[in-house]
Amino acid sequence: MLNDQIQKLVNNLIQIEHVSTTLYLAMSAYMANQNYTGMAKWLRIQSEEERTHMLKLIDYLTDRGGVVELQELPAQPKEYGSPLETFQKVLEHEQFVTNSYRQAYNYAAQTDQQTAVIIQEFLREQIDEEAQSQKVVDRLKIAGDNPSALLVMDQELGQRAAGPAAGAAPAGG
């Protein structure tokens, strides 16, 4: 059985992942409306990964006898600017998520080792999440306003395939 503070902490992480899912889905729709179908696909896959994270946390909480408290989701913007501006927002959001997991881990490591282990899996994945987002931002900066370069980037991002989410493979896998 989880204590109230750990239950609240995990519910907060569930909310963060839930918001992430809808944020990336809204960004995907925006990019699709701008005819950047590859970027839209990349963001759609990102949305699904965040949903998988949310579901894993829900399962963990219920498996430990906790109560899931899904909260209302904030409305997402309809526009995100240029591809570069959109992916800068992705990077900023991933940095926020990393910081949230880091704070949660610091608390859980002192009070509930099992929860700390689960959070650590997500922290490991956040290294890749931030690195991928940073790479896209850096490459979009290089592309600038060059339509040909943006289309090449769009095609490249459209080749992303869905991969395993945190906890779906052994650590490091």
Image: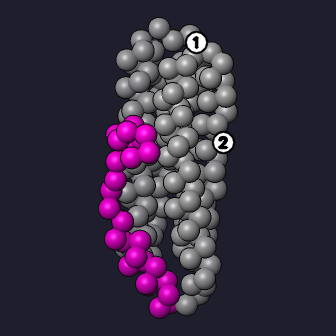
Q: Nearer the viewer, mark 1 or mark 2?
A: 2
Going from the N terminus, do you reach mark 1 or mark 2 first?
1
Report the disc number at residue 4.
1
Image point (60%, 82%), residue name: 142
Q: Is residue 55 left or right of residue 123?
A: left
Three-letter code for the amino acid on which mark 1 is drawn: Asp
* Percent coordinates x, y for residue 162 in the rendering: 33, 56
Q: Nearer the viewer, residue 74 or 128?
A: 128
Q: Nearer the viewer, residue 5 or 36?
A: 5
Image point (64%, 37%), residue name: 102
Report the disc number at residue 89.
none
Mark 1 is surrounded, within 10 Å at the Cα level, by few (under 14), some (14 to 19) or many (20 or more) other residues, namely few
Image point (57%, 56%), residue name: 130
Q: Is residue 61 left or right of residue 12?
A: left
Residue 10 is at least partly visible in this image: no
* Percent coordinates x, y for residue 139 in the rendering: 56, 76
| Colouring mode (rainbow / by chain / secondary structure / one colour) | one colour
Three-letter code for the amino acid on which mark 2 is drawn: Asn
Query: Quick check: 30 above or below 1?
Result: below
Helix, strand or loop status at disc 1: helix
Helix, strand or loop status at disc 2: helix
Mark 2 is surrounded, within 10 Å at the Cα level, by few (under 14), some (14 to 19) or many (20 or more) other residues, namely some
* Percent coordinates x, y for residue 13 in the rendering: 54, 33
- Please report the bounds of the magenta region as a residue range: 147-173
**Residue 73 forms part of the magenta stretch:** no
Image point (57%, 16%), residue name: 112
Query: Quick check: 92 above or below 4?
Result: below
**Residue 170 forms part of the magenta stretch:** yes
Query: Quick check: 149 above or below 32?
Result: below
Q: CA distance from mark 1 to mark 2?
A: 22 Å
Q: Name the residue tied to disc 2.
A: 99
